Amino acid sequence: MGYEAAVLRRAAKRLAQRRRRREEEQERRRREICAQLPRVAEIDRELKGTIYQIIAASLREGRDPAPSIKVIRDRNLDLQAEKARLLTEHGWPADALDDKPACPRCGDTGWVGASMCSCLRQLCAQEQIAELSKLLDLGEQSFDTFSLDFYSPLPWPGEELSPRENMEFILEVCSNYARKFGKFYFHNLFLTGAPGLGKTFLSACIARTVSEQGFSVVYDTAVNVFARFEEQKFARDREEAGEAKDETRRYLGCDLLILDDLGSELTTPFVQSALYTLINSRLSSDRRTVISSNLSMDQVRQRYTPQIASRLEGEYRVLPFYGDDIRLLRKGQL
């Protein structure tokens, strides 16, 4: 589990900027207090010097340093009490000169040992959501705002469940998939159905929820994904080939890949090969994938190789969307 390097860099930069602003504010406050209360400045300097006295006392040869250390410690406590009294008498908090990081757990470094601190993880989630928002509308899209009102409660031809009953089930699966990411029974989802039924909306909900839990999420359309694979293989320009290679690594290595609009691409032998590589590599490395498509499973079998169709049917939970076009229904209400 981890964020992409670019996301982590941006988040770490924001954390460093926060730390720098806090330090600048702390220094401004210190100068103001010292100008107003010179005695406090003297005490502060003396307190900082006691550490060297303690070290010197402990290193003296031929005598027990404990009594000297006790005297210094008692003097230190007296100075701290005097400083606190002066500060509070003049309207400052007793700890106004203390260095107080915004995150006491990591000291604003972003790391606790080798583990990422929650403060940095939160910034990473924000940066990743901002990145996803370039392609997905993540403004108000969440499972809590998903509405079933436009799905008919009436029977649908050829289906056992009404569109609303079907969407209630799909919503529950997608919600649990995202909120229990990595631990849910279904590892991969295939959202299939006509346009305007909520596939992209639910993909955005999944992306947001999984991102907020600290997982790396990459969203892209099938057209863009296969174009990148093609550039990596055939580009003559070294820089373009390098950029395409970095992108394909993202597709293969992220915790969750959301591949949107499968079937909109031109299905060449190369695309068939790239799609198989993408699906099979992610299955082999146990990385989760959500694919959405306007194609039915029958059309998938006709369009792609048997190996691809077999993996989509066998390793993905197929969720068929049906009903009236939500976009048209909403437009009709305007």
Image (cartoon, grey):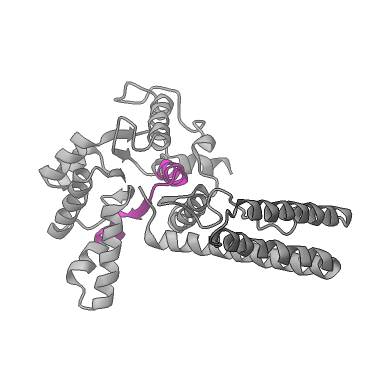
Instruction: Using the rendered view, name the quadrant where residue 249 is placed.
Output: bottom left
Q: Is 251 placed above or below 200 here?
A: below
Q: Nearer the viewer, residue 42 or 29?
A: 42
* Image: 281 above or below 42: above
Pinpoint residue 310: horizontal percent, then vertical percent. 14, 38
Would residue 152 appear left or right of 280 to someone viewing this image? Answer: right
Q: Quadrant of residue 225?
A: bottom left
Q: Where is residue 59 shown, x and y percent of the image?
A: 54, 61
* In the image, farthest residue toward the bottom: 237
Q: Which image quarter: residue 250? A: bottom left
In the displayed structure, would residue 49 be above or below residue 153?
below
Q: Residue at x 54, y 59 (%)?
A: 62
- The residue sitting at 55% across, 56% down in the picture is 108
Quadrant in the picture for the C terminus: top right
* Residue 319 in picture, x, y percent from top left: 31, 33
Residue 146 or residue 178, whichever sits in front = 178
Q: Residue at x 46, y 45 (%)?
A: 208
Residue placed furthest toward the right: 89
Horizontally, residue 223 falls left or right of residue 75, namely left
Residue 205 lies in the magenta stretch: yes
Q: Is residue 294 visible?
A: no
State the predominant SS element of the stretch in magenta: helix
Rendering coords of residue 257 (x, y %): 32, 49
Total marks placed? 0
Compared to residue 54, the image places residue 237 above or below, namely below
* Horizontal relation, residue 225 to residue 328: left or right: left
Instruction: Tell me where the magenta segment starts and ends, as one range.
Output: 200-226
Q: Nearer the viewer, residue 214 or 48?
A: 48
| Camera sees residue 301 | yes
Residue 32 located within the stretch drawn in magenta? no
